[in-house]
């Protein structure tokens, strides 16, 4: 699956949409921050790109002062690196040490990776593949339209 616009815009709605912004601002502040940086080929510069990812997955993390307060109890920055051995998810976790200890964050991270592995296994299963509107951006179809077409034409693909 593809993330629309490579994930750009998630979270911006709260700050830039005149109608939805105040409604979303009424919700409690999130305690977990998640930043998906995108999917990148390792060691490949892209013309016109504002930045490229380092080959070392440990190199992306942050350079802030340890005394600077975190905006969330847990901050997670993730990206996918396409390398010679295939795609690899890299995640950098930081947390407020006054609220959580390393074993708690490690358990949470392991549960997160386990959940992602289960989702990937489900998505890869042959009998569960179906298109979504983001898979066919060149046509104006909603999910019910796609499901109707799939019931008529068994071998639909993007």
Image: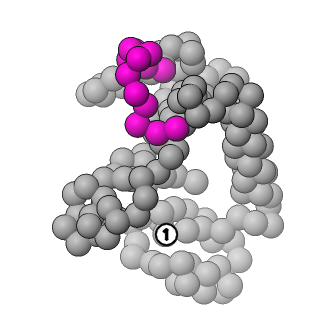
Vertical arrangement, residue 144 with respect to residue 13, above or below = below
Q: Residue visible at 23% across and 72% down?
A: 19
Q: Nearer the viewer, residue 62 or 71?
A: 71
Task: Please give the name of the residue rendered at 69% of the width and 71% of the height, measured from the top-left corner.
Answer: 155
Residue 7 is left or right of residue 147, and the answer is: left
- Front one among 27 and 47: 27
* Prevailing secondary structure of the magenta residues: loop
Front position in the image: 85 or 65: 65
Q: Which residue is mark 1?
A: 133
- Range of residues picked out in magenta: 61-73
Q: How is the image coloured?
A: one colour
Q: Tell me what residue is drawn at x 40 percent, y 37 percent.
A: 71
Secondary element at tag 1: helix
| Magenta span includes 129 | no
Q: Is residue 42 above or below residue 5?
A: above
Q: Residue at x 25, y 55 (%)?
A: 15
Left or right, 59 with respect to 67, comes to right
- Residue with the most extreme left position: 18
């Amino acid at each position: 699956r593809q993330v629309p616009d490579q994930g750009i815009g998630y979270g911006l709605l709260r700050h830039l949409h005149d109608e939805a912004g105040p409604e979303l601002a009424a919700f409690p502040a999130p305690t977990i921050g998640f930043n998906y940086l995108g999917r990148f080929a390792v060691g490949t510069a892209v013309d016109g790109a504002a930045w490229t990812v380092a080959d070392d997955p440990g190199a992306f993390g942050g350079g802030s002062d340890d005394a600077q307060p975190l905006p969330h109890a847990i901050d997670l920055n993730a990206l996918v690196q396409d390398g010679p051995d295939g795609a690899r998810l890299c995640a950098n976790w930081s947390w407020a040490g006054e609220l959580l200890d390393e074993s708690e964050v490690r358990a949470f991270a392991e549960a997160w990776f386990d959940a992602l592995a289960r989702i990937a296994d489900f998505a890869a299963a042959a009998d569960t593949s179906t298109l979504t509107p983001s898979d066919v951006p060149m046509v104006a179809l909603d999910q019910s339209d796609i499901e109707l077409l799939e019931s008529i034409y068994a071998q639909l693909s993007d």
